[in-house]
Image (spheres, grey):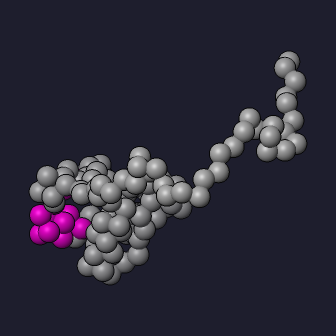
Amino acid sequence: MAKKKSLNSLADLGGMVYSTGSAPSWAEDDTTYEGLAPEDQALEAHLEKKGRGGKVAVLIKGFVGSEDELKALAKEVKNHCATGGSVKDGEIIIQGNLRDKITSFLKEKGYPVKRVGG
């Protein structure tokens, strides 16, 4: 087995460059990410109760857009359904079996929604 080299100082890392200048041009990315229009997205409303202590939740998957847009949509859905929920791993999780109410709300906003499972 190869012996690991110990690092006792910054010099052991092989050198470091420190600059007080401005950021390099490749680090200045001014492009903004724009999500798809609602009618161009393909959302799926999943009914799930695994890993939730027997409680039912609706997962909305397939949203394409920024994290802020996803959180804003989740907030609108939660307010419309008057229930709790969260955003995790690019999915909106809404507590309770409110899939019909959620799909009708999203369709009113212009999102095509497909019911999946259950």
Extreme residue in the top direction: 1
Count how many numbered circles sit on residues in the image.
0
Residue for point 28% across, 75% down: 76
Magenta residue check for 105: yes
Residue for point 41% across, 70% down: 85
Question: In x, y percent, where is residue 4?
Answer: 85, 28
Q: Is residue 69 above or below residue 62?
A: below
Q: Would residue 59 be seen by someone viewing this image from the given angle? A: no
Question: In x, y percent, where is residue 79?
Answer: 30, 80
Q: Is residue 78 above or below residue 99?
A: below
Quadrant in the rendering for residue 7: top right
Q: Nearer the viewer, residue 11 or 95?
A: 11
Q: Is residue 10 above or below residue 47?
A: above
Identify the magenta region.
102-115
Residue for point 22% across, 70% down: 101
Quadrant in the rendering for residue 74: bottom left
Quarter of the figure with the N terminus: top right
